[in-house]
Amino acid sequence: MPPVVTLDDLTAMMAADEHHRYEMSPEGVLSVMPPPGYAHAIIATRLMVWLATGGIAPERVAQAVGLRIQGPDGGVGGRIPDLIVWAKAQADGVWLPVADVLLVVEIVSPGSEGTDTVTKRREYAVAGIPQYWTVDQDPAQTVTMYHLDGGHYDVRATMPLAWLLSTAPAEHDLV
């Protein structure tokens, strides 16, 4: 490992190791995660189908794409959200900018609760991403919707995934 890890290093690590995902906070903290499980993948798929049938163009939605996250002190990190919705289609790349991101979704896996509900929430707020949702893998698959307000997220709503899927993406400022 190099003494200072860059996003290019993370890209090379992921290319060499298809069994893990690598992320880094803007402060340089490296996270190594196994690939998501089946239940996690089904939640992501259900959300993708909901967005697509709700009128979101396919080129505006992606799963597991890297985002370049800048911290308040100028450090640069890379996060790989489970789902991203953009305002417009993006150019191809491994670590995309956050400028056009409307929504980031993290499906909370066992062991990632603190990172998904505290660390990433803070980083995405500093990056200026308007909406951040978490989906718990509890029996109700609880969705917590956060809305950016003055540099931090406020809870807008909490509901079971089934209820969310009975609404339209336009009701959540995503069209």
Image (cartoon, rainbow, N blue to C red):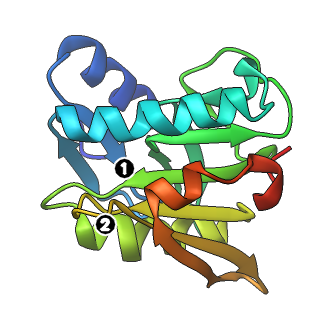
100 left or right, relative to 33? right
Point 79% across, 23% down: residue: 57
| Quadrant occupied by the C terminus | top right
Above or below for 125 versus 139:
below
Q: In front: 158, or 149?
A: 158
Q: Is residue 135 left or right of residue 149?
A: left
Amino acid type at circle 2 is: Thr
Position in image of residue 63 (x %, y %): 49, 30
Q: Which residue has dot 1 on it?
A: 24
Residue pointed to by mark 2 = 115
Q: Is residue 102 left or right of residue 49?
A: right
Q: Nearer the viewer, mark 2 or mark 1?
A: 2
Q: Quadrant of residue 153?
A: bottom right
Quadrant of the image occupied by residue 39:
top left
Asked if residue 53 is positioned above or below residue 83 in the image, the reply reads above
User: Does residue 69 sit above or below 49 in this rendering?
Assistant: below
Whole-angstrom CA distance, mark 2 to mark 1, is 11 Å
